[in-house]
Amino acid sequence: MGIERDYLMRQLMMLFDVIQKIFNFRKKGQKEEAGEQIRYFYNYLKLETKIQEKNIESFLDYLVSEKKFTNDHLEMIAFVLKEQGELAESAEQKLDFFRKSYFLLDKVDRESTSFSMDRQMKLAELREYLN
């Protein structure tokens, strides 16, 4: 059990580093580099690249039932989806990414036993985009 936990923690830390790179590249206007990091993130988790084609319910079912991701994974995926929304060119794509991100973060927030200010700030930010 300890080895599994150590592996999971290392994986989450590595994914967090990738999310930081995505965020920094997007803030600097380096969209191509941010896109490369997003692809790396999804490849590392062995996720389908066409997730935007899935509706929210089937997307969540895919992540939880098929991939067996933890809430920590779901939260990181939600952060990446938000960044993809920021990078999206069309308003429709932005909304789709933001909806999926909000839905995942809301699920994690409802099920989490710990409070996260970062999660609350992302949820508030996404609520603003969606309203």
Image (cartoon, helix red, strand yellow):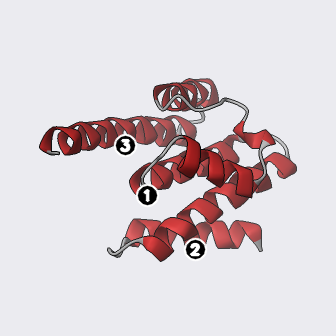
Q: Closer to the camera, 60 or 103?
A: 60
Amino acid on which disc 3 is placed: Phe
For mark 2, does the 10 Å Cα neighbourhood hold few (<14), some (14 to 19), or many (20 or more) residues?
A: few
- Which label lies toward us, 1 or 2? 1
Q: Are marks 1 and 3 in contact (CB under 8 Å)?
A: no
Q: Nearer the viewer, residue 31 or 57?
A: 57
Q: Amino acid at mark 1?
A: Asn
Ranked by sequence position, the earlier of labels 2 and 3 is 3
Which residue in the protein does label 1 denote?
71
In the image, what residue occupies the spot 66% across and 72% down?
127
Q: Relative to 83, does residue 129 appear above or below in the rendering? A: below
- Decide: is 36 above or below 116: above
Residue 122 visible in the picture: no
How packed mark 1 is, by other alpha carbons closer than 10 Å (few <14, some 14-19, many 20 or more), is: some
| Secondary element type, mark 2 | helix
Q: Which residue is mark 2?
A: 124
Task: Give the Cα distance between marks 1 and 3.
Answer: 14 Å
Disc with the residue nearer the chain's start (1 vs 3): 3
**Residue at coordinates 54% horizontally, 43% vertically from top-left?**
27
Helix, strand, or loop for circle 1?
helix
